[in-house]
Image (cartoon, grey):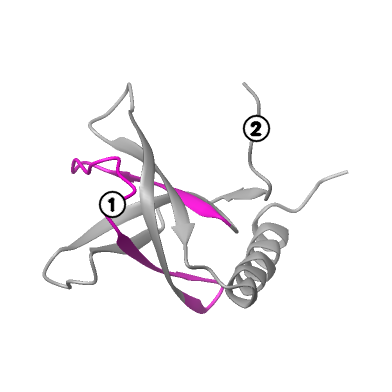
Amino acid sequence: MINKRRLFRVKIKGFEKATMVYNDNYKNMFTIILVNISGSGLSFMSKKKFPVSQNKKFSFIFELEGEEFHLKGFIIRKAPRENDKFIEYGVKFTSLTTKQESELISILNKYQSKHYKLKI
């Protein structure tokens, strides 16, 4: 399988919870579990079923290294997990400014160096 990502992704340790809001309507708010994050998207798990569609816009709210992020995106893939009732989803961020992307990548670098120290 060819990796088409232009940015690295960082696996999130443990079960880091985040909030997902459909169409900026806080009545449609869901708790999700982050799997990994990159400067262009993220992956999460949930027991709820969500559609794969560029027309369904979501906001993703999470905290990483003391910084809170509010990023918009849409679901580009979903895959049921074999061993449990969770579904894993892939999200592509939209409307991400260069500044937001740089800030996110900087925090991801900090997170990665803190949680994944190389042992040589």
| Front position in the image: 28 or 53 | 53
- The quadrant holding residue 59 is bottom left
Q: Is residue 14 visible?
A: no
Can you say whether 2 is above or below 115 in the image?
above
Residue 100 lies, in percent from the top left, at 58, 74
For the residue labelled by badge 1, is the local secondary structure a helix, a strand or a loop? Answer: loop
Label 2 to label 1: alpha-carbon separation: 25 Å
Q: Residue at x 26, y 53 (%)?
A: 56
Question: Could you classify mark 2 by the number of other residues whose Cα lies within 10 Å: few (under 14), some (14-19), or many (20 or more)?
Answer: few
Residue with the mark numbered 2: 3
Choose between 2 and 113: the one closer to the eye.
2
Q: Magenta span covers which residues?
A: 40-68
Q: How many marks?
A: 2
Looking at the image, tell me whether mark 2 or mark 1 is earlier in sequence order: 2
Residue carrying label 1:
55
Residue 82, position as x, y percentages in the image: 33, 21
Q: Residue furthest left?
A: 27
